[in-house]
Amino acid sequence: MSGTLNFTLKVWRQNGTKDSGYFEEYEAKDISEHMSFLEMMDIVNEKLEAENKEPIVFEHDCREGICGSCGFMINGQPHGHKSRTTTCQLHMREFKYMDGGTIVLEPFSAKPFKVLKDLMIDRSAFDRVIQSGGYVSIRTGSAPDAHSIAVEKDSADKAFDAATCIGCGACVASCPNASAMLFTGAKVTHLGLIPQGQTERYSRVQEMVNQMDSEDFGHCSNFGECTLACPKGISLDVISQMNKDLLVSQFKG
Amino acid sequence: MRFLQSTIGLKILMAFTGIILVGFVLVHMLGNLQIFIPFQGISGEAAIDKYGYLLKSNAVVLWGARSVLLGAIVGHIFAAVKLTNRSNAARPRKYELHRWFSDSYAVRTMRWGGVLVLLFVIYHLLHFTVGVDAALFTEVKHCGPLEGGAANTCFVRENVIRGFQQPLISGFYMIAQVALGLHLTHGVWSLFRTLGFTSQQWSERSRILAMSIGGLITLGNIAIPLSILMGIIK
Ligand code: HEM
Ligand code: FES
């Protein structure tokens, strides 16, 4: 059949957090090149279910690249080799070059990211980092008048870029130190650069860095793997911004 | 929050101690390149010998500088070891397959390159500063009166030439300079990021600066053993 591909999937299977885990191989046959990676996984799982075997567990939700739940390692890279793409938005035509070959699938690996099952990990450490940032003191209630708070164009753009982080964890997964600095930096930057985020700016960066460290993520070596792995292309500058804010916070009492 | 216990605090410590060390390495190289200045007069001293004596003549300045450098090295390595341990613990399950996105050699050699540089620094100090002869396969002449007893000097030029005429010693020095250069092509760029120079311009500027410093240090320092091996300086 034209336009179909065949692969062997070498998949990490792990039955719960206590299991030690192992690799198993599955055949993915007659895969349309127009399918997304997750659709291919669905086909493989349907076959497994038909054979009364345990389907491969992976996380997914929106399947449109915005919720951030679908990441795992595909051939040694989070969300696969295509840049700025989540696994759900990755199409099988990107794998034409390795038709007939083996694709290795394993969960993101970091101490705070416990494997829940197979390819699904617990990313709640990210939630706790965000929670530690606390509240922002802004006037709520009636809607503010347009332009009542002036935001510099450059800051608005940078804050917006940082805010596109979907919290998928690819940065941690690709980092040789399993560092969460791109994620935390994005969160620190998107509030820190706009006027609405100024009141708690310096206490927030301390709290968030503290939480990030106590979750046992690694440090940043400025290798830059994270920004290349990030499906949103979050810039390494957010880490530098966080470093600067933390340094400044030491002199703000 | 305990700033210096945080991952970022430790990196900032590495960056500041790194700056001290880079500054030293640059000045040290310029000092060493004086070996290329020819002898003055018939029985005059070599420029580098005078310079060596000058450095050693004021004990307060000498030991002051040594303390700062020792402090910087200790702080730098303390942070490097702490962060490396943390990093290893942060990924308990190694990937079956891990492909890097970038192909920079410098970033992957930060740790082993750093260790090589440390071994080099120890050997280098034993060689020229302490002057342990036999163990290091060469002989070192300590500072003292010039022939005829007129004035005190240090026999830097003679010691350097005698040491570097041995290919094994020269070879090790040259390999160490490549390691140091690589360490700095990533390190100098990285320290600007660590210290919060965020903009695109700074990113580009610091990359150029890092490449230049790394290259300069490697080439400048290699020039000396190489010239001696090739008989250009004798
Ligand atoms: C003596 C043995 C040395 C060891 C073991 C060592 C180790 C390291 C390591 C592991 C890093 C990277 C840390 C990370 O981000 O993961 C680093 C960074 C760095 N090193 Fe060294 N290093 C040594 C010597 C030196 C020397 C002699 C210099 C300067 C001439 C230097 C300058 C730097 C700089 C500038 C950085 C970047 C700091 C930053 O990223 O903010 N290091 N070193
Ligand atoms: S499933 Fe939501 S980003 Fe992929």
Image (spheres, helix red, strand yellow):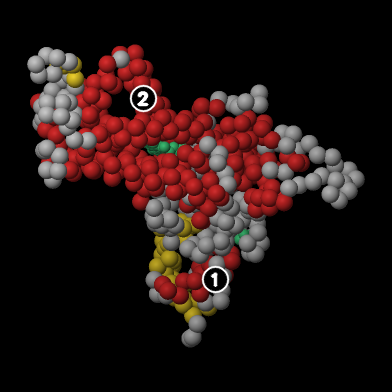
Q: Amino acid at mark 2?
A: Leu
Of the pair B43 and A166, the residue shown nearer to us: B43
- Please indicate, yes or no, whether residue A96 appears anywhere in the rendered image: yes
Tell me where residue B161 sits by quadrant. Answer: top left
At label 1, counting other C-alpha atoms closer than 10 Å, the crowd grade (few under 14, some 14-19, many 20 or more) is: many
Instruction: Select label 2 or label 1 by which is in front.
Output: 2
Q: Secondary structure at mark 2?
A: helix
At label 2, counting other C-alpha atoms closer than 10 Å, the crowd grade (few under 14, some 14-19, many 20 or more) is: some
- Please indicate, yes or no, whether residue A105 appears anywhere in the rendered image: no
Tell me where residue B214 sits by quadrant. Answer: top left
Which residue reaches farthest bottom? A1
Residue at position x 84%, y 40% in the image: A139
Tell whether B94 sits left or right of A148: left
Q: Secondary structure at mark 1?
A: loop
Of the pair A170 and B42, the residue shown nearer to us: B42
Residue at position x 63%, y 64% in the image: A63
Of the pair A215 and B76, the residue shown nearer to us: B76
Query: Compared to B84, does A44 lie above or below?
Result: below
Tell whether B100 sits left or right of A78: left
Residue at position x 75%, y 41% in the image: A195
Count the marks: how many? 2
- The chain that hosts pointer 1 is A
Residue A91 is labelled as: 1
How far apart marks 2 and 1 lie (CA) works out to 55 Å
Residue B69 is labelled as: 2
Q: Amino acid at mark 1?
A: His
Q: Position of residue B138 (x, y in %)?
A: 11, 30
Tell whether B180 sits left or right of B188: left
Q: Is mark 2 in CB contact (under 8 Å) with mark 1?
A: no
- The chain that hosts pointer 2 is B
Which residue reaches farthest front? B41
